[in-house]
Image (cartoon, rainbow, N blue to C red):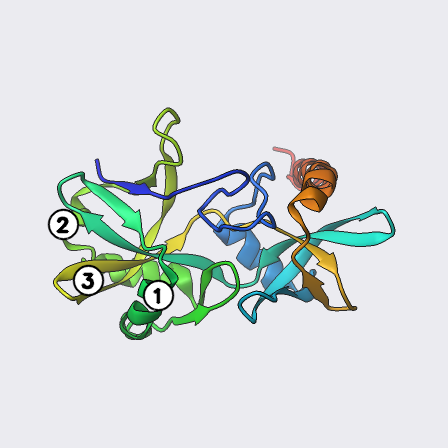
């Protein structure tokens, strides 16, 4: 089986190197996020990364106050994505992490995504995909753009060699550069980010100490909200 090796550290579930990313929150599925955003039920905000001058548009999920500051758990509006390359000897898809390499690969990656109606965005914390991702996944699969990877039922990622593999994502673009084969992958599990409010609709990255304090509060609220949603679904289910 070919696995996707994503380098993780601390709280990071998919190698987004910032304390703003929470590992403990159980994120909803990609389809569930899309349905919620389409319903227009979430308050829209921006999370700013001042160190790189980038931002990412998010939907606000839960909030918590701590020491007079308002914090929120945030879901990116667009689908998080990564660039990966195949290590044929190890049978592992490795994420391209070097910022300089990503900048060089972005033009070709954008063209590859554009073939399936997607726009690849260079947003804060992660690349994101704008457009009909599910249709693009189906179309890319029919075109067998993953080549040698097509023999696998799914692409997995290994956060840790001692942990079970988890479904990582789907190939939505492929291209060659410098003798190497690269893939654009839409991640299956949305990122859950933590931000501190700076203005009505702008949030900034809190410090790692702040995240350690407020993160568990937000996680509890997210779990409670998820349980409430499940109970409502059960109540709405028609009796047979």
Towards the viewer: 91 or 116: 91
**Which of the marked residues, 1 or 3, is nearer the chain's N terminus?**
1
* Disc 1 element: helix
Where 1 falls versus 183 (above or below)? above
Q: Which residue is mark 3?
A: 143
Q: In the image, residue 134 lies at what x, y percent?
A: 39, 59
Q: Which mark is residue 148?
A: 2
Q: Residue at position x 44%, y 41% from top?
A: 8
Q: Residue at position x 72%, y 52% from top?
A: 72
**Which of the marked residues, 3 or 2, is nearer the chain's N terminus?**
3
Q: Which residue is mark 1?
A: 100
| Gap in angstroms between the C-alphas marked 2 and 1 | 27 Å
Towards the viewer: 231 or 120: 120
Question: For the residue carrying disc 1, how many other residues have a C-alpha within 10 Å: few (<14), some (14-19), or many (20+)?
Answer: few
Q: Which mark is residue 34?
A: none
> In the current view of this chain or complex, which residue is farthest to the right?
68
Where 106 falls versus 29 (above or below)? below
| 52 with respect to 214 (left or right) | left
Where 169 falls versus 219 (above or below)? below
| Gap in angstroms between the C-alphas marked 1 and 3 | 30 Å
| Gap in angstroms between the C-alphas marked 3 and 2 | 13 Å
Q: Quadrant of the N terminus?
A: top left
Towards the viewer: 111 or 107: 107
Res. 154 image quadrant: top left
Q: Quadrant of the C terminus?
A: top right
Q: Residue at position x 15%, y 54% from top?
A: 147
| 194 with respect to 35 (left or right) | right
């Amino acid at each position: 089986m070919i696995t996707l090796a994503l380098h993780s550290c601390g709280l990071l579930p998919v190698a987004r190197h910032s304390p703003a990313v929470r590992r403990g929150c159980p994120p909803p599925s990609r389809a569930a996020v899309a349905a919620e955003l389409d319903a227009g039920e979430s308050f829209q905000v921006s999370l700013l990364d001042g160190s790189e001058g980038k931002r990412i548009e998010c939907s606000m999920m839960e909030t918590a106050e701590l020491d007079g500051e308002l914090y929120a758990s945030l879901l990116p509006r667009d689908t998080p994505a990564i660039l990966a390359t195949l290590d044929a000897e190890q049978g592992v898809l490795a994420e391209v992490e070097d910022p300089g390499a990503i900048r060089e690969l972005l033009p070709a990656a954008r063209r590859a995504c554009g073939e399936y109606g997607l726009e690849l965005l260079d947003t804060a914390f992660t690349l994101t995909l704008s457009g009909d991702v599910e249709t693009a996944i189906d179309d890319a699969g029919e075109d067998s753009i993953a080549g040698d990877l097509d023999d696998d039922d799914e692409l997995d990622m290994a956060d840790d060699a001692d942990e079970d593999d988890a479904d990582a994502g789907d190939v939505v673009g492929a291209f060659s550069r410098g003798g190497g084969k690269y893939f654009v992958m839409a991640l299956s599990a949305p990122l859950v980010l933590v931000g501190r409010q700076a203005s009505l609709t702008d949030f900034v990255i809190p410090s790692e100490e702040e995240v350690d304090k407020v993160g568990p509060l937000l996680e509890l609220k997210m779990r409670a909200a998820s349980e409430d949603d499940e109970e409502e679904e059960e109540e709405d289910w028609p009796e047979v």
